[in-house]
Image (cartoon, rainbow, N blue to C red):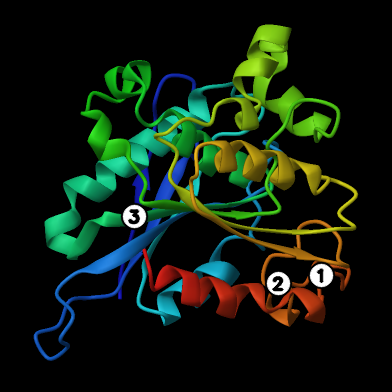
Amino acid sequence: MLTEVFPIQVKGSEPGAKLCTYIIEHSESIGVEKRPLMLMCPGGGYEYTSDREAEPIAMHFLSVGYDVAILRYSCKPAVYPTALLEMAEAMKIIHRYSEEWHVDTDKIVVQGCSAGGHLAASLGMFWHEAWLAEAAGVANEVLKPAAMLLCYPVITSGEYAHRGSFENLLRGQYTEEMLERTSLEKQVTEHTPKAFIWHTFTDESVPVQNSLFLIEAMKKYEIPVEFHMYPVGGHGLATCDKWSLTSDGRGVQEECQSWLPLVKKWLENI
């Protein structure tokens, strides 16, 4: 296993923003020439990045042959689009080292939980736009994800918003124009990549309407989505088992643990 930490500093970055890579070392004795990669964005309401939604989930992707890169992006007091520019920088790093790491750059999946889902989906919505490529200093194709894997994502800034995420993301930019811009169900285009999404019906922090609105928008463009809505479960479940328990003992939800084997099957078709 090759592990490395790449500091990331773009305009507006907070100290400590970094990309942590976990690369399955290439071996002549293993008949795998290139591996797909999962670029992960832990949640935390744009206030912090959750440890529970980082390595515990990454271990599952490593176990099915994916390389993993975890982006510890800038949160409050950093403001939009700092974290998105850091996502672009992460994609640049992955492409820069793709030959050395034996990464299949056509199979880079962006993954995120909660507010991290908003960030991952933001790259899915905006990768093709000129302003982002110009800010990153690369061609748009370098920023293109193959797919999005969104776990109980923050999507809408409207009636069913997780208001704290947008307040932390926008701060002094908290205007109707910027709320519209960052309400991602309104930013879906024919360029949006396919997605796997899961949510719980009883999520009281980020209502399931966030996922439903995004799915409805993607359906208008006939962009494939696999969606799983579980009837019970709170927010921030991560792996839903003992390996991502909260410090006070919450977070085990057996009914939702199937998302990992389901996404494993879905990833086979990326």
Residue 180 x %, y %: 66, 17
Residue located at (67% from left, 72% from top): 239
Question: In this figure, which residue is indicated by the disc labeled 2?
Answer: 244
Q: Does the image show residue 166?
A: yes
Left or right: 204 as drawn, with respect to 81 = right
Tag 3 near tag 2, CB within 8 Å: no
User: Helix, strand or loop at disc 1?
Assistant: loop
- Residue 251 marker: 1
Q: Does the image show residue 59?
A: no
Q: Mark 2 or mark 3, which is nearer the start of the sequence?
A: 3
Residue located at (18% from left, 80% from top): 32
Q: Mark 2 or mark 1, which is nearer the start of the sequence?
A: 2
Left or right: 11 as drawn, with respect to 130 = right
Amino acid on which the number 1 mark rests in the picture: Gly
Residue 100 x %, y %: 13, 61
Tag 1 near tag 2, CB within 8 Å: yes
For the residue pair 112 and 208, the one nearer the viewer reads as: 208
Nearer to us: label 3 or label 1: 3
Query: Which quadrant does the N terminus fall into?
Result: bottom left
Left or right: 207 as drawn, with respect to 51 = right
Q: Quadrant of residue 206?
A: top right
Residue located at (26% from left, 69% from top): 35
- Residue 108 marker: 3
Left or right: 56 as drawn, with respect to 26 = right
Q: Mark 1 or mark 3, which is nearer the start of the sequence?
A: 3
